[in-house]
Amino acid sequence: MIRCGLVLGTLLLGACVGAPDASTPQPVAAVEVPRYLGAWHEVARLPMWAQDLSSVSCEDTVATYTARPDGRIGVLNRCLNALDNDKPREAAGQAYAVAGSNNARLRVSFFWPFYGDYWVIGLDPDYRWAVVGEPSRRWLWVLSRTPSLPQAEFDKALGIARTQGYDLAPLKVARGQRG
């Protein structure tokens, strides 16, 4: 029942829905929706089309997830465009949990009727940070409840991504995390 999405309008043209297999990243066992709701700061990401263009470079990205009356999750992603004097940008969408995923695999849409995958592949037990990806491993986000993570926690989150087969060479680290 978790419904989320990041500025990740990214996910909307994402892969098809299907059961994960050994060749795809594996989501966490379960996500408790009420604990996941709220604001999440992006502390790192793999470059993606909605956030990284010749005229757009999203910084200080915050994704806010809210419960909707229809049982879905409202998604509001905000960032500052570093290539346009930190002009604010935002994208609003919605998401729903994939049946049988214990809320760890979501479908998110910023442009109906297109949906993309949002899989929680790493999650701190106290919901202080999360690692979100999708089946093709093209996109990845490390999210935190605060603008930065202690280095040991950040390294742990990146370790999960590496273990799940993500190439982190092109990783973009948020200016808040860079210190």
Image (cartoon, grey):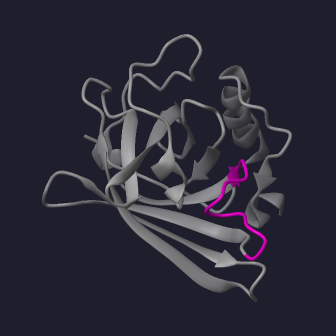
The front one of 148 and 163 is 163
Q: Is residue 131 visible?
A: yes
**Closer to us: 1 or 129:** 1
Quadrant assignment, res 131: top right
Q: Residue furthest left?
A: 69
Residue 31: name its quadrant.
top left
Could you say where residue 123 lies in the image, as x and y percent from the top left?
52, 35
Q: Residue at x 62, y 57 (%)?
A: 42
Region rendered in magenta: 44-55
Give left or right: position of 95 versus 80: left
Q: How many discs appear?
A: 0
Q: In this rendering, is residue 35 above or below 87?
A: above
* Quadrant placement of the N terminus: top left
Which secondary structure dominates the residues rendered in magenta?
A: loop
Q: Residue furthest right?
A: 169
* Direction from residue 165 to residue 132 in the image, left or right: left
| Residue 179 versus residue 48 in the image, above or below | below
Residue 91 in picture, x, y percent from top left? 47, 71
Q: Residue at x 66, y 39 (%)?
A: 138
Q: Could you tell me residue 121's position as x and y percent?
A: 53, 31
Quadrant in which the C terminus appears: bottom right
Position of 111 compared to 70: left or right?
right
Residue 13 position (above or below residue 132): below
Position of residue 101 in the picture relative to residue 28 (left or right): left
Which residue is drawn at the image coordinates 64% and 33% (left, top)? Answer: 137
Q: Is residue 72 magenta?
A: no
Instruction: Judge whether residue 126 can be spotted in this image.
Output: no
Is 50 part of what is drawn in magenta? yes
Q: State the residue in front, 178 or 119.
A: 119
Q: Position of residue 61 (x, y in %)?
A: 61, 67
